C-alpha cells in the first residue's frame, strides 16, 4: 500500500484506541511514557516517576496519601511535566529522623518536574498499520471460535491465512461442508445460524480492511479504518450474549501476541514504525517539603521546658532523574541536592506543684529549634512488570520493584531506605489500578537509631494520561 500524505489531521478509528491499550498506551498516533513503568506506590523519591493518579498507603505507624497529575506535549523538546504531592502522618503526630525524606514522617511533600521522553512521539505509521493488523487478528480470532464448533480436523488453518478476507472465505467453505453438530451427530441449526451471522458481519470488516490496504491517500485509508472499526463494534454489540464470540470481543491482546499467533498474517500485513525495545526519559524536578515540629527553646544555655514553640519550614531540593525501559524491565536513577532536617523528639514533662501535690504533663517535643542542613540525595529503582508466572489470559498480573534511597547530610550521618513493593495490576491495562504490599527497611545514623522494619499496604488508581497537546 502506498499512501500519499498531505498535511491534514484525521480522527483515527475507535478501534485504534482499542489495540493501543495492549501496546502500553497510544493516543492519536502518539506513544506515551508507560504507566506500567511508573512507581506502583507513587513513591515521591522514586526515579521511575509518580504517574498520574492517587495512592493510599497504610502502615502500623500511620497513613500516607499521594496524588499526582501529568501532561504530555507532542513535538516539543520538553514533552511532559508532572506535579505530585504526598501527605504523611504517624499515629503520634510525631516526625522521625530526616523528616524531609523519611516516608513515615508527617508533613507535606511535593515534586514538580518536566523533561523529555522518547516514548512521547507521533507514530502515525505505527498507529495506522497496528490498528489495521489488530482488526485482521481480531477477525481471525472470531473465526477460530467458529472452527471450534466444526468436526475435529476440519477447521481452517488460520496460521496460513494472510488476511481477514482469506479467513472468511475459508471458514465459509468449511462451514458449508462441515457444519456444527449437536450431541446426536445432527446439524446444530442454531449454532450454524449464529456462525453464518458472524461470517456475514466479518465480511463487512474484511471489505473495509481491503479498502484500507488498497487506499492511495491518507483520507481514504482513514475512512476505511474507521469503517472497519465501526463494523467491529456493531458485530460485538450484537454478540454480547454469545459466549466465545463475546470473549474475543472483550479481550484485548497485544499486536505482538497476534503477530506470534498468526505468522502468515504478520508477513502479509506488516506493522511499521513501532518504537524500539529500548526507551528512555529524563527530567528535572523541584522537590519541596513542608516540615514542622514542636520544640522547647534554648534560653541562656537552658531549655525552657514550659515554653512550647512550633517550628515550620519549607525545605527545598533539586533532583534529576533518568529512566530506561526495556520490554518488561525499567531502571531509574535519581540524584540531587537539597535540605533535610533532624527531628529528634524527646519526652518533655512540665511539673506543676501546689503544696504537697504535683501534677505532671508530658509531651513529645524536640529540645532546641530544628536546624535544616544541606544534603546529597540519591535513589534508584528497578521494576519488573508483568511477571508472567500466571500465564496468558489472566485478568491480573503481578509485578515487583526494588527501590533504594539515601540521604547524606553534609554535617554527617545518613538516612537510608530499602523497599520491595509487590503488587497486582490488570493485565490489559498495567497500573490503571494497583494494589499490593511493601516491606521496607530504614536505617539511620547520627543519631544512631538502628534498623526499622515495617510493611505497608497500598492501593491506587491510575486514570489515562490527558490527551497530549501539540506545540
Image (tube, rainbow, N blue to C red):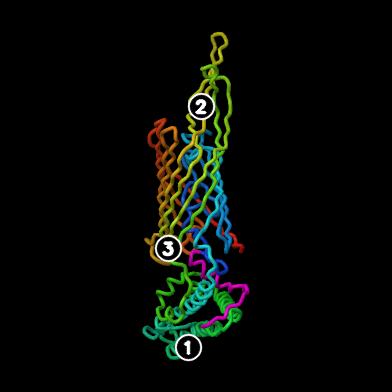
Disc 2 + disc 3, Cβ < 8 Å = no
Q: Nearer the viewer, mark 1 or mark 3?
A: 3
| Residue depicted at x 41% and y 36% | 414
Disc 2 + disc 1, Cβ < 8 Å = no
Q: x, y (%) of residue 221? A: 57, 80
Marks 2 and 3 sit apart, C-alpha to C-alpha, by 49 Å
Provide the residue designation for mark 3: 278
Which of these two is toward me, 301 or 435? 301
Kindly identify which numbered label has been placed on residue 351.
none
Q: Mark 1: which secondary structure? A: helix
Segment colored magenta: 1-24
Provide the residue designation for mark 2: 366
Prevailing secondary structure class for the magenta stretch in the rendered image: loop
Q: Mark 2: which secondary structure? A: strand
- In this rendering, the answer to whether 176 lies above or below 135 is below
Residue lying at the far front in this picture: please name it. Answer: 77
| Residue 231 in sight in this render | no
- In this rendering, the answer to whether 358 lies above or below 313 is above
Task: Give the mark nearer the N terminus: 1 vs 3.
Answer: 1
Provide the residue designation for mark 1: 169
Disc 1 + disc 3, Cβ < 8 Å = no
| Residue depicted at x 53% and y 21% | 298
| Residue 357 in sight in this render | yes
Which of these two is toward me, 116 or 220? 116
Residue lying at the far top in this picture: please name it. Answer: 355
Locate residue 241 relative to residue 180 in the image: left or right: right
Q: Crowdedness of circle 1 by 10 Å Cα count: few (<14), some, many (20+)? A: some
Amino acid at each position: 500500500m502506498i499512501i500519499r500524505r498531505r498535511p491534514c489531521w484525521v480522527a483515527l478509528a475507535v478501534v485504534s484506541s482499542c489495540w493501543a491499550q495492549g501496546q502500553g498506551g497510544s493516543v492519536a498516533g502518539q506513544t506515551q511514557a508507560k504507566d506500567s513503568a511508573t512507581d506502583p506506590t507513587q513513591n515521591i523519591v522514586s526515579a521511575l516517576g509518580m504517574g498520574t493518579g492517587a495512592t493510599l498507603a497504610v502502615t502500623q505507624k500511620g497513613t500516607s496519601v499521594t496524588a499526582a497529575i501529568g501532561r504530555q506535549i507532542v513535538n516539543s523538546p520538553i514533552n511532559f511535566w508532572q506535579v505530585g504531592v504526598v501527605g504523611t502522618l504517624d499515629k503520634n503526630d510525631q516526625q522521625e529522623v530526616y523528616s524531609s525524606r523519611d516516608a513515615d514522617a508527617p508533613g507535606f511533600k511535593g515534586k514538580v518536574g518536566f523533561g523529555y521522553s522518547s516514548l512521547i512521539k507521533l507514530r502515525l505509521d505505527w498507529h495506522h498499520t497496528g490498528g489495521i493488523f489488530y482488526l485482521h487478528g481480531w477477525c481471525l480470532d472470531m473465526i477460530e471460535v467458529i472452527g471450534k464448533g466444526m468436526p475435529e480436523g476440519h477447521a481452517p488453518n488460520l496460521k496460513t491465512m494472510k488476511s481477514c478476507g482469506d479467513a472468511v472465505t475459508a471458514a465459509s467453505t468449511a462451514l458449508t461442508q462441515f457444519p456444527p453438530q449437536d450431541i446426536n451427530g445432527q446439524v446444530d441449526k442454531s449454532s450454524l445460524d449464529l456462525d453464518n451471522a458472524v461470517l456475514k458481519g466479518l465480511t463487512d470488516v474484511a471489505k473495509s480492511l481491503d479498502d484500507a490496504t488498497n487506499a492511495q491517500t491518507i483520507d481514504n485509508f482513514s475512512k476505511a479504518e474507521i469503517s472497519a472499526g465501526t463494523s467491529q463494534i456493531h458485530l460485538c454489540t450484537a454478540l454480547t450474549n454469545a459466549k466465545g464470540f463475546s470473549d474475543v470481543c472483550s479481550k484485548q491482546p497485544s499486536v505482538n501476541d497476534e503477530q506470534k499467533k498468526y505468522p502468515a498474517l504478520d508477513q502479509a500485513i506488516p506493522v511499521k514504525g513501532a518504537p524500539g525495545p529500548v526507551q528512555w526519559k529524563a527530567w528535572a524536578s523541584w522537590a519541596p517539603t513542608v516540615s514542622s515540629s514542636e520544640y522547647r527553646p534554648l534560653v541562656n544555655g537552658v531549655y525552657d521546658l514550659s515554653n512550647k514553640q512550633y517550628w515550620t519550614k519549607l525545605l527545598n531540593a533539586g533532583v534529576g532523574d533518568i529512566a530506561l525501559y526495556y520490554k518488561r524491565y525499567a531502571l531509574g536513577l535519581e540524584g540531587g541536592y537539597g535540605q533535610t532536617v533532624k527531628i529528634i523528639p524527646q519526652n518533655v514533662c512540665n511539673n506543676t506543684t501546689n503544696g504537697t501535690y504535683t501534677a505532671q504533663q508530658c509531651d513529645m517535643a524536640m529540645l532546641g529549634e530544628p536546624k535544616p542542613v544541606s544534603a546529597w540525595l540519591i535513589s534508584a529503582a528497578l521494576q519488573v512488570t508483568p511477571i508472567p508466572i500466571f500465564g496468558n489470559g489472566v485478568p491480573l498480573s503481578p509485578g515487583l520493584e526494588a527501590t533504594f534511597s539515601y540521604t547524606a547530610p553534609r554535617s554527617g550521618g545518613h538516612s537510608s531506605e530499602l523497599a520491595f513493593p509487590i503488587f497486582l495490576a490488570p493485565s490489559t491495562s498495567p497500573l490503571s489500578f494497583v494494589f499490593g504490599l511493601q516491606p521496607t527497611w530504614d536505617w539511620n545514623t547520627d543519631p544512631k537509631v538502628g534498623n526499622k522494619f515495617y510493611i505497608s499496604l497500598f492501593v491506587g488508581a491510575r486514570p489515562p494520561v490527558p490527551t497530549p497537546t501539540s506545540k
